[in-house]
Each structure stands twice: as structure tokens, then as C-alpha cells.
Amino acid sequence: MHVEFFGVPRQRAGTSELEVQADTLGHLLGTLAAQIPSLNEIIDSNRLHASFVANLNGGQFVTDPETPLRDDDYVLILSADAGG
Amino acid sequence: MREGNVPFGYHGRYLRIDVSTGRADYVPLSEATLRQYLGGSGLGVKLLLDEGAASMDPLAPEAPLVFAFSPLVGSPLTTSAKFAVVSKSPLTERINDSLASSGFAIAGKGCGCDAIMIVGRAAELSVVIIDDAGVRLESATEHRGKTCREAELALKTRLGPSYRVASIGPAGENRVRYATISHDGRHAGRGGSGAVLGAKNVKAIAVRGTQRVEWAHPKELTELSRSLSKRSFGPATAKYRELGTATNLLTFNRFGALPTRNFQSGTFDQAASISSEEMSTTHTKTRKSCMACTIGCEHIYSKGGKGVRVEYESLFALGSLCGVGDADAVLRASQRCDELGLDTISTGGTIAFAMECVERGWLDQPWLQFGSGEAMFRAIEMIGSREGLGDLLAEGSRRAAQAIGHDSISIAPQVKGLEIPGYEPRALQTMALGFAVGARGADHNRSGAYEVDFSDKVDRRHVTLDAVRHAIETEDKAALMDSMIVCKFLRGVFEDFHEETAEMLRYVTGWDVTAAEMHDIARRIVSAKRQFNLLAGWTPAEDTLPDRFLNTPLPNDPEASLSRERLDGLVAEYHRQRGW
């Protein structure tokens, strides 16, 4: 699936988007942490740190590591605090 | 309890200054009042209610304007150097509390008071000076027309560098209904407190005080302060520290939540060109902190000349909302608003509204086109001076719509007269509720309901009544933070917000305050604001959004649709849960 990073996650990832193979949210996050060590600051044991959130296909925000993912999904990773 | 029944952390009195006569009195504040309303917004609203301000014309001489400090000001707690400016708003005719930061809070509280109330109207443009010698008014006529920064620097040169100055710019002098009060580059920005001060013929307040309060448990307070400061360097504040609020722009654009061309769209095709990410590659960026803050959220961009502080709200209001995709034009406009003392959200909102009226043929000002940075800048100058069209736009979008007619009120981007911040209500529907019921109008600082939309608690485009309790929680939390006062950018570092803020208050005041009492205080302050609005003439019909948001889904996102029936249901449930 397609992963897009915003704000601090984008800084840590060093890229705005990439393609990853994973069948659950936890698997995806674990893969990202392994591929990009600087993401370990925001990913802890296949979960996002409480200050960050993941969104599935622009609709629902998801936290459960068992959330199933499909190949054509896209996951957005951003700061939880949207304050301006 | 200190000598004279004054609680630790407080002076137990406020300073009431009548600038018509020059008379200044210290008025006692009871311990019960302080414990019930804390400081900041809460104390300010309480003082306004006691003064009968709700029924007054906010620009009349008798209308009070309160600078309220807090029990935490002067403590080692990070972000505690803050103050609230509270009055009836000339823009909304409802309660208005706006906050700003830095040395004015510390020096003001050092004048031996927990709040400063200004009433009356000076005979000439004046500066109110409060120091260890007392209170006096001096002429400020030579500072007429000076920008906020120029006035602040000139007064510090005249009085001495140890004075801290809060000033208005030309917009406040001209009673633009969304003029700000500025201090150290920050603004008490929303709702027109600068016009209230301008109507009193007061250009600035200069404070220099050295009276300190004592803390009930200084050792524990120091330890807590160290812990909080340490946590403030962690991931919960990384966004503000490393990127600033401006990084919201691309995120919101991706979610279709970036207000564009007066809320005609939730995406802006030139968003990338005005994003902080892009500007970081074309401009030099530096960081700055308010006094006593460990976060350092101010990101200042420059390109050869003097730097401009960039915040998301200014980028959206003077960028996508007006269809302007030229970063330098947006920065120039933002800087000019800071100089004139204009709220960037209301400025951008009112100009964008006028641009759409021109587009629809309702306003004969063909030069005022979406996408033109030059036209936007020209409109800002006209607003600041109230010249030509600026005299109408200085009234805000609601009053301008009433003058323009053509049912333009349905596209005026405001609630209760306050222009809507950078959160598209159809795409963020818990925030839509927060805007609708906000005591000071559409507001992202008194309701943090967008946090709920950016979580798994709701489906942001299809919210149900379950969202209401979450919206209320964020509103209550904001009321506490604005009264304690601590910066909202700290909110992510608390594991148990009410317990931890109760702990702060225990160490500062010695009161046996609990988390449950903090909940009660929050509800009391929210209710006090509602009480003010009721006395000012509020009716339930005000708790809504403009028709635009309730008739039309967002282009390119048909799921982002909010009917009047659904919003009315959310608002009714909100009132029911509040017990109103």
C-alpha cells in the first residue's frame, strides 16, 4: 500500500511517501520502523506514539495494530495535534 | 494562606484604572473568587460580569477591558508567562477573551495585582504607565499612527528598557472591529480588544513591577517545573518546536479541510507553494520563544529583509482563503497585519468574503480578485486606515454582509460575527459543532474539537451525537488552560490533565484542590461566559453556521456534507449535556 507522511513524521522519514507491503497496520508500522530507523521515535512496538496518528484512505483514523490493510489502501501518518 | 488572607500565588486584588479621571484603585479579590475562577479568562469574565459589562456598548467609555494574569505567572512552570485580555467584543457583541504571552504578564503581575481593569476614555491619546511609583497617564499623541512594534519600541526608549509594553497599532486607533493588542511580537488577536483600547484613547499600557508572590510549596513546584520542562522537549511538542503550526497547511489540504477561496473549496491547488516545507527551502528560518517557554513555537521566515513570524492561521487566511499562492505576498500581508494590529483570521476572512461578493457581482470593486496578492495587500491597508472600501471591511464580514445585501450573509464566513479559523467545518464536523456553540464565535482556541476529528473517536465527515461529549471535554479543557494559564501547545505532554493541573495549583496556592474540582472550575468558567452572552442578548439561533456550510457539500468530496438538521441536532444535544 501507499504511505504518506506529514509534518514531523515526514521529517523523520525523510520522504513524503513510499510503497510498503503489509497486511495489517501493526505490520506496516513495524516494517516502516525497520526500514527507516529514524521513525523509531514515533513508532513503538508496532504502534504509533500517542502524539501521532494514522488515517486510512482519508476517512477513518485507525489505532488497532490488527486493522487489516489491502494493497490498494493508502495510509496517512501525521501529528495527532492539529492545533494552529 | 499568606498574611492578610491572600492565597499563595496571588496578590488578592486587581487594579481598576479610570483613564477619564486618572483615578486608580486596588480592589480586593476574595479567596473564593480566585479559587472559583483562577485567573486569565475565568477571572476576566467574572470581573466583567461584576462590572455589568454585558449590557454596555463595548466601545463606550464605561465598558471595561481587563488584562488578567494567573496564579502561575512568575512561577518556574514552562509557558506560564501569559495573560488574557477580556472584554465585550465590538465584533461579536459577545464575550471576548484573547491571550498573549511574554514579559508583560510577569511585569504586570509584578505591579502587585492579579488583573488590570481599564475603564473610561482619556482626553487625548495616552499611555497608561504602572510601576512602583504608582499609576499615571502620559500623552502618546506623538505615537499616533505608529505600528504596534514602533510604539512598543518608542515607549521602551522613552520609559526605559525594563518596562514591558502592550500596544495597539493604527487599526486599534481607528477602531477596526478586529484590531489586536500586541506585545513582543505576539497578539491578543481575536475579537477586537485593540478597538476597545483604541476607543479609550489608550495607545499602550506600560508596566514595570517587582512585587513577587510566594508559592505554597516551592520545592515541589520546582521539581514539577523541571519535569514539565523535560517533557516539553519530547515528541508531544515536536511539531511546534521543529516545524511550527504552519505545517498544518499541507496536512489539511490532503484531508480536504483547508478553507480555500472563501470556503468554496477544501483544497488549494497552490498549497505547496505557500507551505512551510517549501518556504524552508527558499527562505531563512529562525526560531523564537515567548519568555519562560521551553517549546519555542515561533518560526520566523526571512529573505534578506526583516523576518516574518509564520503561523498556520495567517497562512490559510491570507493564502488559500484569498486564493493567493505567492508565498512572499502572504508573508508581506501577514507582516502588515502585525504592524497595523489586525487579526489575520478576521482580516483574511473579511477580504475573502468581499472577493467572492465581487466575483458574484454583489460588490463593485473589480480590482479585488481572488488570487491577487496586490489586491489583498491594498485591502489590508484600506482596512487599517478605514479608507474607502476599508471602512466597510473594518466592520467584519457579518456587518459588511448586512450592508451589501443579496443574501451575502449566507457566505459570510463567521459565527456570531467572528470569522471562522482554518478548519473546514464540513470536513471536520466535531469542529463544526465547536464553532457553532463557541461563546466568542467561531474559534479554534476555545474549542479544540478538531482534536476529536483527527482521532479514532469519530468519523470526521459523519459525526453523530456521540461527538458532543468529546467536544464539551475540549471546551472545558481550553477554559482551564486559559485560566490557569498554560499554553495549549503543552496539552500533549499531560497524561492526566486534570490531576496534573490540580497538582500545579496545589503547589502554587496550597489549596487542597483535586481533579474533580478542576472539572467543576472549567464548567463554571464556561457557564460564566454563557451567562455574559445571555445578558448581552444571546439567543439559541446564534449557535449555528452560515447557510453555505449547510446547503452545499464540499466540491471534490461529496462525503463532506453537513445538513442543517444534523447540525441542529448536535447543537441541541450540546445544550442538553451542558444543562442549558
Image (cartoon, coloured by chain):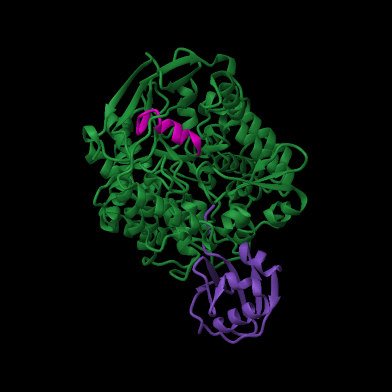
Chain colours: A purple, B green
Q: Residue B187 at x, y = what percent?
A: 53, 37
Q: Residue B247 at x, y = what percent?
A: 62, 56
- Image check: B475 left or right of B521? right
Q: Residue B280 at x, y = what percent?
A: 72, 53
Residue visible at 29% across and 29% down in the picture: B51
The residue most toward the bottom is A23
Q: Residue B512 at x, y = what percent?
A: 24, 52
Q: Which image quadrant is residue B575 in?
A: bottom left
Count of number-bearing discs? 0
Residue B179's place in the image compared with B514, above or below, is above
Residue B265 in sight here = no
The residue most toward the front is B219
- Image check: B61 left or right of B363? left
Based on the picture, tell me whether residue B520 belongs to the magenta stretch: no
Residue B551's place in the image compared with B208, above or below, is below
Q: Which image quadrant is residue B434 in?
A: bottom left
Q: Quadrant of the N terminus of chain B?
A: top left
Residue nearest the observer in this picture, B374 or B306 = B306
Q: Point out the stretch of residues depicted in magenta.
A: B102-116
Residue visible at 60% across and 57% down in the picture: B248
Residue nearest the observer in this picture, B572 or B206 = B206
Residue nearest the observer in this picture, B476 or B392 = B476
Q: Which image quadrant is residue B483 in?
A: top left
- Image check: B518 left or right of B375? left
Based on the picture, tell me whether residue B106 belongs to the magenta stretch: yes
Residue B151's place in the image compared with A1, above or below, is above
Residue B225 in sight here = yes
